[in-house]
Amino acid sequence: MSLNSPLEISRALVAALSTQMFRYYEDRIPQDASILVVSNHRSFVDALVLMAALSSPIRFACHHYMGQVPVMREIVTGQLGCFPLDGTQNRQKSFFLQSQLLLQSRQMVGVFPEGTEPMVKFTQPNMLGEFQRGFAHLALRSNVQDLAILPIAIASLEEVNTNGFPLRLLSIFDPSEPLFNQSGWHPLVFYRRVAVLIGRPYWITPQHQKKYHGKQARDVVAQVTEHCHGEISNLLRQGCY
């Protein structure tokens, strides 16, 4: 088979890693809609697992350094279609601009709201960190019709953990990231068996967008963020036990 799409590459790599994947609640995936996928994140293979589970290419926002490291850059951006964010100064603007254009063209966009920390510090499979709220701001200001946020839990059932490379090595490619300015190794998590549990979609309505102004904006952003965090947290507990 010719591997000429992110979906085909994802399926092939998941198979090559001998990852056994179980998918639950696939009937919750919206049809004929723009979809913003929101998920927990502990492993480099999470993007591959999500694409394989949803049977669809997903354009993931990824850390700035992934667009700087040779080989990784070619795989992550060239083959898998992820878009690395700009440096610290323009990161937020870059995220909103690129994501909005993709959603408007009905491409599926993926975000890991926990950020970088759970990737560089080993965490337990059932743990979920605090969410950054950028994805909620994106959904509320994107002016995309029929937009659904789809929360998904990646629940590791059996995994292999190993050390990847020194964290300080990554600071060469992104010196602005304080998490890279420390001793120790970047952990690598590979799933042997993993459950992908799809949550209830959260539809962005004109009422939500109307509230995204003035003093009400903070409340509606918090509402969207808390819904997705709570949904993934509940699914994660369900999948890990």
Image: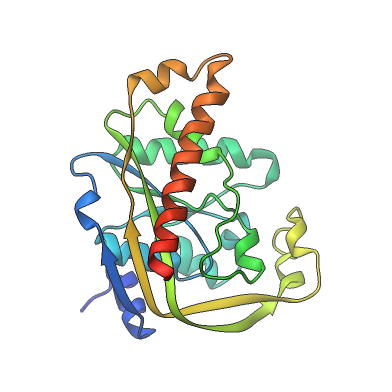
Q: In the depicted view, which residue is nearer to us: 175 or 152? A: 152
Residue 231 position within the rendered picture, expressed as x and y whole percent measured from the top left: 41, 48
Q: Is residue 79 visible?
A: no
Which quadrant of the structure image shows residue 14?
A: bottom left
177 shown above or below 104? below
Q: Nearer the viewer, residue 138 or 226?
A: 226
- Residue 114 is situated, as x and y percent measured from the top left of the image, at 57, 53
Q: Which residue is drawn at 42% across and 71% down?
A: 241
Residue in the picture at 36% in, 81% down: 19
| Residue 41 rendering spot, x and y as whole percentages | 51, 61
Number of numbered labels in the structure image: 0
Q: Is residue 5 left or right of residue 134?
A: left
Specify the quadrant of the image occupied by residue 4.
Answer: bottom left
Give the quarter of the figure containing the N terminus: bottom left
Residue 197, located in which quarter of the rendered image?
Answer: bottom left
Residue plotted at (57% across, 77% down): 188
Position above or below: 223 against 115: above
- The colour scheme used here is rainbow
In the displayed structure, does residue 77 sit left or right of residue 29? right
87 sits to left or right of 58: right
Residue 182 visible in the snapshot: yes
What residue is drawn where x is 32% and y is 71%? 9
Residue 158, above or below 120: below
